[in-house]
Amino acid sequence: MVETLVVLNNYFNDFFVSMVFVTAIVCSRFVRYGLRATDDESSALVRYALPKLDKIFIVSVICAILGGALRYTVMSDFELADAVRNGQVLAIRVKYVMLILLFTAGVIIRSLSSERSAR
C-alpha cells in the first residue's frame, strides 16, 4: 500500500512540475499578447484569463514543492533502490536534473512575465 502511494506521489509530482512550466509559458504568452493588444476584447481576455492561470501556477508550485519534499524523503527506499537494482542510476539522475530545470525555468519565466505585466 505504501509503495502505491509513493508511486502516485511521484506521478503527481512530475505532473505538477510540468504544470509549473506549462502555465508559466502560457502566462508569458498571454502577457506578451496583452501588451500588444490594440482592441478592448483582447485586453479583456487577458485580464480575465491571467489571474486564473496565476492560481493554477501557484497551486502547481505548492504541490510540486510538497510532493518533491515527500519524494525526497522516501527516494532512497523506493526509487533509488529500484534504479540501482536495474542499473538505471544515470537515467534517474538525468530525470531529476530535468525536473529541477523545468521547475526553475517555470518560476523564472513566470516571474519575468509578472514584472513585464506590472509595467
Image (tube, rainbow, N blue to C red):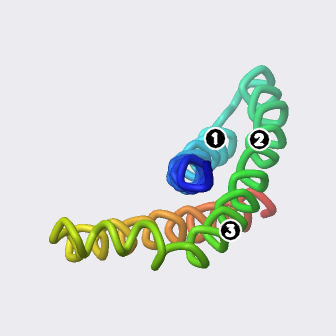
65 lies left or right of 82: right
> Is 90 rendered above or below residue 20?
below
Q: Amino acid at mark 3?
A: Ile
Type of the residue with mark 2: Leu
Q: CA distance from mark 1 to mark 2?
A: 7 Å
Q: Secondary structure at mark 2?
A: helix
The tag earlier along the polypeptide, 2 or 3, is 2
Is label 3 in a helix, a strand or a loop?
helix
Front residue of 81/8: it is 81
Percent x, y for residue 49?
77, 33
The mark that comes first in sequence, 1 or 3, is: 1
Residue 119 in view here:
yes
In this view, which residue lies farthest toward the left? 87
Residue at 74% x, 41% y: name it.
Answer: 53
Q: Is residue 115 above or below residue 42?
A: below
The residue under the point 83% across, 36% down is: 47
Residue 29: where, in percent of width, then height?
56, 44
Q: Is residue 62 left or right of residue 85?
A: right
Please, is residue 41 above or below residue 49 in the view? Answer: above
- Rendered location of residue 30, percent (x, y): 63, 40
* Marks 1 and 2 close (CB-CB < 8 Å): yes
Q: To which residue does mark 1 refer?
A: 30
